[in-house]
Amino acid sequence: MILSTVISQLCEGMVTSIEIFLLTLLFSIPLGLAIAGGRMSKFKPLQWLMKIYISIMRG
């Protein structure tokens, strides 16, 4: 392989990784805020549901 080909492929991989990171960030922050808001809610069934969700996600 030619060095320029390898560098080109590495740059494409880096761009793909950055795109995936930005998409993850775009969806995870609002989801996390919604879950945190539900966990702190005064509505007990919502608190209970969020506790279960968090327990499942933590493992």
Image (cartoon, rainbow, N blue to C red):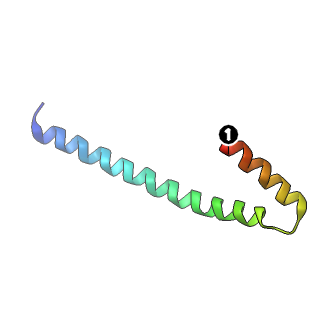
Residue 39: image quadrant is bottom right
The residue sitting at 64% across, 60% down in the picture is 32
To which residue does mark 1 refer? Answer: 59
Location of residue 46 in the rendering, given as x and y in whole percent from the top left corner: 84, 59
Q: Is residue 34 left or right of residue 3?
A: right
Total marks shown come to: 1
Q: Is residue 49 left or right of residue 28?
A: right
Please tell me how crowded label 1 is: few (under 14), some (14-19), or many (20+) other residues with Cα within 10 Å. few
The residue sitting at 81% across, 67% down in the picture is 41
Viewer-closest of 36 and 2: 36
Secondary structure of the residue carrying numbered label 1: loop
Query: Residue extending furthest bottom?
Result: 42
Query: Residue extending furthest right?
Result: 44
33 shown above or below 55: below
Location of residue 6 in the rendering, given as x and y in whole percent from the top left corner: 18, 38
Viewer-closest of 28 and 53: 53
51 shown above or below 8: below
11 shown above or below 32: above
Q: Is residue 25 left or right of residue 58?
A: left
Classify the position of the N terminus by image quarter: top left
Classify the position of the C terminus by image quarter: top right
Q: Is residue 5 left or right of residue 24?
A: left
The residue sitting at 10% across, 38% down in the picture is 3
Location of residue 37 in the rendering, given as x and y in whole percent from the top left corner: 73, 67
Viewer-closest of 15 and 36: 36
The residue sitting at 82% across, 53% down in the picture is 49
Q: Amino acid at mark 1?
A: Gly
